[in-house]
Image (cartoon, grey):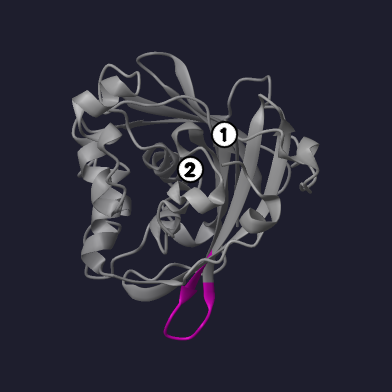
Amino acid sequence: MAIDYHTLRNWAFDDVRQTYTERDCAIYALSVAFGSEPLDTRALKFTYGPELVAAPTMAAVLGFPGLWMRNPETGIDYAKVVHGEQRVTLLRPLPAAATIIGRTRVQSVVDKGEGKGAQVLTSRDVIDAANGEVLARVEQLNFCRGDGGFSARGQAGDAPLPALSPMPDTQADLVCDLPVRPEGALLYRLNGDLNPLHADPASARAAGFDRPVLHGLATYGIAGHAILRAVCAYDATRLKMLFARFSAPAYPGETIRVEIWHRHGAMLRFRARSLERDVIVLNNGEARIE
């Protein structure tokens, strides 16, 4: 079954109602390397009360609509889907505990051409159920590698997405190294992503990896942590937007080095690499700081 543009573009998502607690908030923070330096009291508020603070990138795991692309009616070859890019825009500070509503829509379906795949961009509002305020907007770009060419068969397609800005060719202004715990993927899966690729060695080998890999959104959360630490003095209210492209997997037990460039005004550029393998795992990163 091939993609039908209009079916996919108008896909009806059910609202996702989710209640999270301070315990969930602390687990997320621990899973993205908060607590790795026990004597850093600035970071302690993300894992320990009395006034717990939510890590801003936790918005990426709230109100998730599930693996909807597995539905055969989407026409998507799910086995060839890759999570390509992620953006979180914070409109209000996340509460340390709340009931939220995740409201998702398909924002764009782009045909890259036969043999080149398609891009599906979804946008999700994370809404405070208590007052209806939008706390965050979460955008996720998936590369559907097996689904290009539908526009050549007479269907519509959305305009190509803007090209990503190239990374600076100068030395980074700031560098922040954060460790991935050896059990980091097992810890991160407690946030709700139970894909066995991140836990089961046999599943990882079947996917072409010699061992379980870290969740891409865990690497993304670690990058957000690094920016909070290196730029914001752990003031969570200052991080307003975080974007990155996933360029390679990271592994539990590695060190993630986040290289940061100051740019114009409130915008930063960044990328992240596995220090041990010297492999860039996140690229084309952008962050907006207030």
Q: Quadrant of residue 215?
A: top left
Of residues 16 and 255, the one nearer the viewer is: 16
Identify the residue at horizontal 25%, vertical 69% (top origin). 21
Indicate whether 166 appears above or below 77. above
Q: Amino acid at mark 2?
A: Ile
Identify the residue at horizontal 58%, vertical 36% (top origin). 143
Q: Which residues are magenta?
A: 125-134
53 left or right of 12 in image: left
Residue 24 within the magenta-colored segment of the rendering: no
Do the residues under discs 2 and 1 have CB atoms within 8 angstroms?
A: yes
Q: Amino acid at mark 1?
A: Phe
Residue 131 within the magenta-colored segment of the rendering: yes
Of residues 81 and 94, the one nearer the viewer is: 81
Q: Which residue is mark 1?
A: 270
136 left or right of 35 in image: right
Of residues 71 and 245, the one nearer the viewer is: 71
Measure how far apart labels 2 and 1 are at the Cα level: 9 Å
Query: Tag on residue 227?
Result: 2
Identify the residue at horizontal 40%, vertical 61% (top origin). 62
Whole-percent x, y for residue 278 in the image? 43, 14
- Numbered circles on residues, count: 2
Residue farthest along the top direction in this orientation? 277
* Residue 79 shows up from this direction: yes
Indicate whether 21 appears above or below 123. below
Residue at disc 1, secondary structure: strand
Identify the residue at horizontal 23%, vertical 33% (top origin). 181
Residue farthest along the front direction in this orientation? 1
Whole-percent x, y for residue 257 in the image? 42, 27
